[in-house]
Amino acid sequence: MDEKLVQRYVDMLSGKVNELGQENVLLKAKLSLAAEEIQALKQLQNQNEIQSSDWTQQSQEQEVENDNSNKAKKK
């Protein structure tokens, strides 16, 4: 083979390797950001579930108190 052709081939392969390496880093960065966002959303969902559970429990306690108050008034 011609030496210039071999050199050009090596240069092009090297460029492609660098390009793929940069793309790999970019994709890993995007994946990392997406994973952090998913984690943040899960935490927010858990907080909302806890708040909802607290609200439901408080509502049920108030209903029981109201029922007891009504029963006491009827007596």
Image: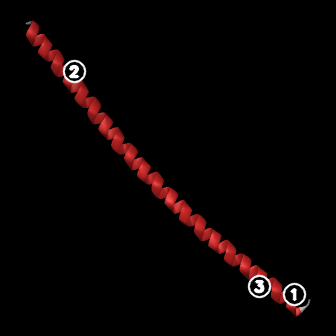
Q: Residue at x 49, y 57 (%)?
A: 35
Q: Which residue is mark 1?
A: 5
List x then y, in percent, for residue 16: 73, 76
Q: CA distance from mark 3 to mark 2?
A: 78 Å
Q: Amino acid at mark 3?
A: Asp
* 35 lies left or right of 8: left
Residue, x 37% and y 44% (percent of image)?
46
Relative to 39, residue 19 above or below? below
Residue 29, numbered circle: none
Q: Is residue 35 left or right of residue 61?
A: right
Indicate the position of residue 26 as horizontal and vertical percent values: 59, 68
Instruction: Say what amino acid the circle numbered 1 marks.
Output: Leu
Mark 3 / mark 2, whichever is N-terminal: 3
Task: Report the residue at 47% width, 52% height from top.
Answer: 38
Residue at 29% over, 30% down: 56
Q: Position of residue 10 (x, y in %)?
A: 78, 85
